[in-house]
Amino acid sequence: MTTIFHFAVDFAQMCFALAMVCATIRLITGPSAQDRVLAFDSLYISGMLTLLMLGIRSGSTAYFDMALLIALFGFVGTMALAKFLLRGEVIEP
């Protein structure tokens, strides 16, 4: 791994960590439920990207599999929260 690539990976991980901190603050202090859903969406995307950067750094494919699972579960969670905010229920009778 070259020095420039190592620096780029470190910088990207610091940016993703900062994005996760900002999303967590918005998740806790969001004035409305819609803000909290968007913060949750941003939080899982930043976590997924952090795992992808760890996978690039280590060369292990396990991180990529975990990132894929986070993306799938995060998408389903966001859709469920959006449906709940829109209709008031997740599962229709």
Image (tube, rainbow, N blue to C red):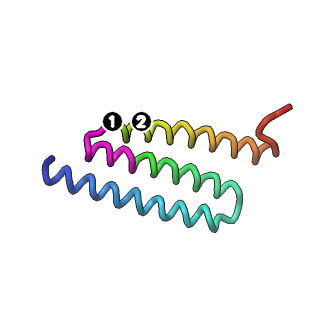
Asked if residue 32 lies in the magenta stretch, the reply is no
Magenta segment's dominant SS is: helix
Q: Residues within 10 Å of mark 2 (few under 14, many from 20)?
A: some
Q: Which residue is mark 2?
A: 65
Q: Could you tell me which residue is drawn at 37 percent across and 59 percent down?
A: 15
Where 93 falls versus 19 (above or below)?
Answer: above
Assess whether mark 2 and mark 1 are in contact (beta carbons under 8 angstroms): yes
Where 22 falls versus 3 (above or below)?
Answer: below
Hey, which quadrant is residue 76 in on the image? top right
Q: Amino acid at mark 1?
A: Thr
User: Which residue in the rendered view is the most extreme toward the right?
Assistant: 93
Q: Amino acid at mark 2?
A: Asp
On screen, residue 21 versus residue 80, left or right, reads: left
Tell me where residue 82 appears, x and y as whole percent: 70, 44
Q: Could you tell me which residue is drawn at 81 percent across and 42 percent down?
A: 89
Q: Could you tell me which residue is drawn at 49 percent across and 37 percent down?
A: 69
Q: Quadrant of the C terminus?
A: top right
User: Which residue in the rendered view is the most extreme toward the left?
Assistant: 2
* Element carrying mark 1: loop
Q: Which residues are magenta?
A: 50-60
Disc on res. 61 = 1
